[in-house]
Image (cartoon, rainbow, N blue to C red):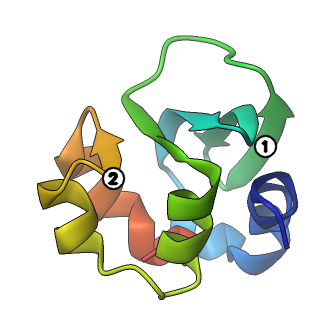
C-alpha cells in the first residue's frame, strides 16, 4: 500500500460520529509520495490531492517513513525525535491520530 492509498482509505475507516462537531485541515507533504489535504468538517472527512486551504497541522516525511509510521513499523515518538517525521502542530495531530488510525 502506498501513501495515497493509505490516506484515501481514511474516510471509510473514520466513524462520522467520532468527528461530529470537529473541524480541521491537515496537509501531508510526503517526499516521494505526493502532497495531500485531509479536511474534517462536522462529521465529514475529505481527502484531496495537493495542498488545499489553510492547515492547522502539516506533516512532513519521506514516503517510506510515513508508511512505516502508519503501519506501526516506526515508533511515533522516535520518528519525531529523530526528525524522520515532522509535525507542525503536535497537539492537533494527537487529537486526530487515533480517530484517523494513523498512530
Crowd class of label 1 (few under 14; some 14 to 19; many from 20; radius 10 Å): some
**Residue located at (61% from left, 35% from top):** 31
Name the residue nearer the viewer: 48 or 18: 48
Tell me which corner region of the image, top left, top right, bottom left or bottom right, holds residue 46: top right
Q: Residue 18 carries which label?
A: none
Residue 70's x, y, as percent?
A: 55, 74
Up the image or down, 86 lies above or below 2; here it is: above
Residue at the top extreme of this rendering: 53
Residue 57 in sight from this viewpoint: yes
Q: In the structure shown, which secondary structural element does the residue marked by tag 1 occupy?
A: strand
Q: Which mark is residue 46?
A: 1
Residue 9's x, y, as percent?
A: 84, 67
Name the residue nearer the viewer: 36 or 47: 36
Tell me which corner region of the image, top left, top right, bottom left or bottom right, holds residue 103: bottom left
Name the residue nearer the viewer: 71 or 15: 71
Residue 32's x, y, as percent?
A: 71, 38
Residue at the left extreme of this rendering: 81
Up the image or down, 23 lies above or below 11; here it is: above
- Mark 1 to mark 2 CA distance (whole Å): 26 Å
Task: Give yes or no for contact between labels 1 and 2 (Cβ–Cβ under 8 Å).
Answer: no
95 left or right, relative to 7: left
52 left or right, relative to 100: right
Quadrant that contains the N terminus? bottom right
Q: Which one is earlier in the sequence, the residue at label 1 or at label 2?
A: 1
**Residue located at (54% from left, 75% from top):** 68
74 left or right, relative to 14: left
**Residue located at (47% from left, 72% from top):** 69
Q: Residue 84 carries which label?
A: 2
**Tag in front: 1 or 2:** 2
Q: In the structure shown, which secondary structural element does the residue marked by tag 2 occupy?
A: loop
Amino acid at each position: 500500500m502506498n501513501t495515497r492509498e493509505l490516506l484515501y482509505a481514511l474516510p471509510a475507516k473514520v466513524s462520522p460520529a467520532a468527528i461530529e462537531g470537529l473541524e480541521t485541515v491537515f496537509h501531508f507533504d510526503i517526499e516521494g509520495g505526493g502532497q495531500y489535504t485531509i479536511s474534517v468538517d462536522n462529521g465529514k472527512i475529505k481527502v484531496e490531492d495537493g495542498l488545499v486551504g489553510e492547515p492547522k497541522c502539516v506533516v512532513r516525511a519521506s514516503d517510506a517513513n510515513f508508511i512505516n509510521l502508519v503501519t506501526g513499523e516506526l515508533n511515533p515518538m522516535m520518528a519525531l525525535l529523530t526528525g524522520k517525521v515532522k509535525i507542525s502542530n503536535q497537539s492537533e495531530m494527537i487529537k486526530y491520530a487515533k480517530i484517523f488510525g494513523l498512530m
